[in-house]
Image (tube, rainbow, N blue to C red):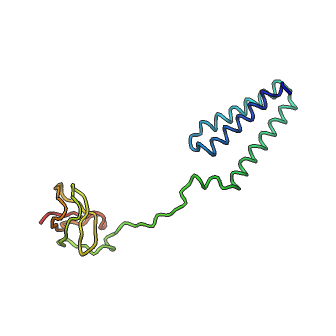
Amino acid sequence: MADWLPVIILILLGFVLVAAEIIFIPGTTIVGFLGMAVIAAGIIVAYKDHGETAGHVILGSSILIFTGMWVLAFKLKVWQKFSVNSSVTGKIKSEADTKLEIGQKGMTVSALRPSGEAEFDGERYEVNTVGQFLESGKMVEIISIEKEGRKVIVKQI
């Protein structure tokens, strides 16, 4: 049994490293590749020290264990822990969604440096100035609406 100890230690250490890559530190791949290399080293030691038959048994066992790990990971849905499962419900207001018109007047509700928020007809919109810095509470007028209503340019009045 003592002559099998290096093979057993290498194979187990390799599988622990691969499992650690999947469960604890996904995305780095370094630990996973290191684990695969350690498993390969264990298989090579088995072939070298114990002959072809023992090497084949260790190789086949390693493949079965590795396949079992993958099947178990899919059945336990391990991959869902690493992905975003929510959806984005927000939307960008387009020109069709807004009731803004050139010449419309409103009030800044935040400082414009040069972008910020202004209120027009009770609704807030993100607006930009042409390089001016305006404080909150200033009256502004829309001078341009660009990119399908996504960029509203204002000036102080």
Residue 85 vs 11, above or below: the answer is below
Residue 152 vs 52, above or below: the answer is below
Q: Quadrant of residue 42?
A: top right
Q: Quadrant of residue 120?
A: bottom left
Is 88 left or right of 148, judged from the image as shown?
A: right
Name the residue furthest left: 157
Residue 104 location in percent, x, y? Answer: 19, 73
Q: Residue at x 67, y 42 (%)?
A: 19
Q: Nearer the viewer, residue 102 or 64?
A: 64
Indicate the quadrant containing the C terminus: top left, top right, bottom left or bottom right: bottom left
* Figure disc tally: 0
Residue 10 location in percent, x, y? Answer: 74, 31
Q: Residue at x 70, y 35 (%)?
A: 14
Indicate the quadrant containing the N terminus: top left, top right, bottom left or bottom right: top right
Residue 105 location in percent, x, y? Answer: 17, 71
Is 82 left or right of 50, judged from the image as shown?
A: left
Is 85 left or right of 149, judged from the image as shown?
A: right
Q: Quadrant of residue 95?
A: bottom left
Q: Nearer the viewer, residue 37 or 144?
A: 37
Residue 69 location in percent, x, y? Answer: 72, 47
Q: Residue at x 57, y 52 (%)?
A: 82
Q: Residue at x 71, y 34 (%)?
A: 13
